[in-house]
Amino acid sequence: MDQRLAVVVYGATGHTGRFVLAELRRRGLAAVASGRDAARLEALAAEWPEVAVRPAAVDDPAALDRALAGAAAVINCAGPFAVTAGPLLGAALRAGIPYLDVAAEIEANAAMFTDHAEAARAAGVPVVPAMAFYGGLGDLLATAAMGEWTAADTVDVAYGLSSWRPTEGTRTAGRVSHERRAGRRVRYADGALRYHDDAAREAQWDFPEPLGRRAVVSEFTMADVVTVPSHLAVPEVRTHMAVEAARDLAGADTPAPEAVDGLGRSDQTFVVDVRVRAGGVERRATARGQDIYAVTAPLVVEAVQRVLAGRTRTTGVASAGAMFGAADFLRALAPHVMVELPA
């Protein structure tokens, strides 16, 4: 394989990383698999001989530099991102190449904007955190719903998941986030992230048919509370989760995802319903698809293709909605994601 201008996938042997690597190959993009476990990388190379492997630990800057040498971009799929994002972004900036990740961790994403924006801007390369189901998709939907509005009063993102079979990576990242915030919950209100000890509450959400009215956990806060207000003038962003999915995630015995089709997807389905309100007017944008881990692959690979083609709106650290034309991007995700957007 010609490794010139290849996209490096860090964490390529993980559950989401394998989906991303497969999507790159499906689109005819050269890929290099990287990560911390050399043995697992060699096993992956035996399965996909055309994919080069470059092992590198995140605490070894020289190894990271070798892993990214000559690459066109890097996609970080290795959590917990509180550990991997900073070192890998540093290596990307030294190499002068775009960095994208699929982080769902709220604090890791917030740190990307607060701690690395100046360096990324100085390097003049695009850096897109949370370019995934959580953080990226909701941000794109909210941006598309906003349209010509320059500000809104509230953004609500409701996740109608049929189930949630978490990967071990999801569980590990969740534990790290829980420890970082000392068990407290977080919300985005009055223009800032605020930590609190309020008990979780349930409410009813009217999803589009055929899902219909469902119980959700209100303020089940996800990465959208970082990505959306990073570029949209909205003082309050709330995310909500279907009760069934929240219970699955909390269950210690909930099994990992199990493939049910040739693409390796689970039978999980989702509806993401976004409502933006301003001055008493509401706009709505929705997305539907299958398997939140698998659908992250077309999201982040579409993004990296647009970055490499120069189809971006800015450089430095920016969320999906700020970096790309939201409505056009969302429509390009078909058939993996089907969207309904305001006229």
Image (cartoon, rainbow, N blue to C red):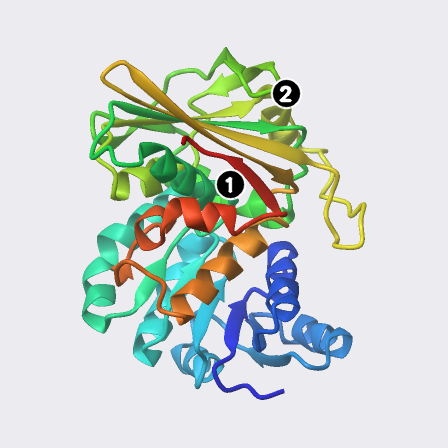
Near mark 1 (Cα within 10 A), the count class, few <14, some 14-19 or many ≥20, is some
Place of residue 214 in the rendered image (x, y in percent of width and height, measured from the top left)? 59, 15
- Provide the secondary structure element on which disc 1 rests: helix
- Provide the secondary structure element on which disc 2 rests: loop
Amino acid tagged 1: Gly
Observer able to see residue 77? no
Q: Write the residue at 44% across / 54% down.
A: 81
Amino acid tagged 2: Leu
Q: Is residue 36 above or below residue 161?
A: below
Q: Write the residue at 61% across / 33% down.
A: 270
Asked whether, in this view, residue 4 is left or right of residue 95, the answer is: right
Place of residue 145 in the rendered image (x, y in percent of width and height, measured from the top left)? 37, 33
Q: Quadrant of residue 184?
A: top left
Q: Write the residue at 32% across / 77% down.
A: 96
Place of residue 303 in the rendered image (x, y in percent of width and height, measured from the top left)? 45, 59
Quadrant housing the N terminus: bottom right
Quadrant housing the C terminus: top left
Give the label, 1 or 2, closer to the camera: 2
Instruction: Indicate which disc residue 174 carries.
Output: 1
Does label 1 or label 2 sit earlier along the sequence? 1
Q: Write the residue at 25% across / 38% down.
A: 232
Asked whether, in this view, residue 159 is left or right of residue 181, the answer is: right
- For the residue pair 121 and 201, the one nearer the viewer reads as 121
Instruction: Indicate which disc residue 211 carries.
Output: 2
Q: Quadrant of residue 180?
A: top left
Observer able to see residue 230? yes
Near mark 2 (Cα within 10 A), the count class, few <14, some 14-19 or many ≥20, is few
All told, the count of numbered labels is 2
- For the residue pair 235 and 167, the one nearer the viewer reads as 235
Mark 1 vs mark 2, CA separation in Å = 27 Å
Q: Is residue 271 above or below residue 217?
A: below
Asked whether, in this view, residue 101 is left or right of residue 227, the answer is: right
